[in-house]
Amino acid sequence: MRTIILVGHSSGATALPDMVARLGQLGVPVKLAIGLDSVFRTKLAGNAERYINFYIASGAGEPVTRTKDFRGALENVDVQSVPGVGHISIDKNQIIQQKVITAIDAVVFSRRPSGAQRQLPAANRAEYRADRDGAAASAPN
């Protein structure tokens, strides 16, 4: 079993709720989904343990709305006051990148090993944190 983490920007963020819903229909649990400034109003259904929507209220971004079918925690975070953040630059902004990485780290490194499962060695965790170029992650349980 793998931990599913999804990250999307712009039209990728618009597609995230559909991906979460489809994976839920297939019985695939989504631990974390992060949207960066969706370009259209989106509604969230399905199951995601945590869904974070970073949006720019003064731009194209909007809060994501939950449907009655959504199960999980939804956080809408307006980042218009973050220096240097715009629709094109939101995924390149170091402050936003750190927020995304912190959320991913909380999912990936918070589990306890059991049986044949184990955490990554400390050296691998450091390498993962140092790799700030990836947009999405899938880590073993």
Image: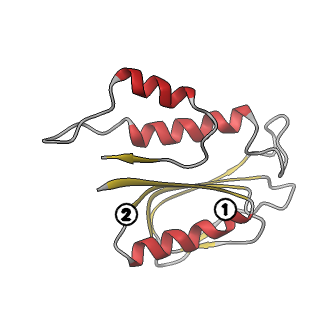
Q: Is residue 68 above or below residue 59?
A: below
Q: Mark 1 touching mark 2, by CB under 8 A?
A: no
126 in relation to 24, above or below: above
61 left or right, relative to 72:
right
Q: Position of residue 101 (x, y in %)?
A: 56, 37
- Residue on which the image places disc 1: 13
State left or right for residue 48 relative to residue 10.
Answer: left
**Nearer to me, 120 or 88:** 120
Q: Quadrant of the N terminus?
A: bottom left
> Secondary structure beneath disc 2?
loop
Q: Picture coordinates of residue 69 (x, y %)?
A: 46, 78
Q: Which three-letter amino acid code belongs to the residue tagged 1?
A: Ala
Q: Residue at position x 46%, y 36% from top?
A: 105
Residue positioned 49% across, 26% down in the render? 127
Check disc 2 and give the amino acid type. Answer: Pro
Who is closer to the viewer here, 11 or 39? 11
- Quarter residue 124 falls in: top left
Q: Residue 92: percent from the left, percent from the top?
A: 75, 39
Name, please, the residue furthest toward the left. Answer: 115
Which residue is located at x 75 percent, y 60 percent?
Answer: 10
Label 2: which residue?
A: 29
- Mark 1 or 2, nearer chain start: 1
| Cα–Cα gap, marks 1 and 2 | 18 Å
Please tell me whether mark 1 sits on a helix, a strand or a loop. helix
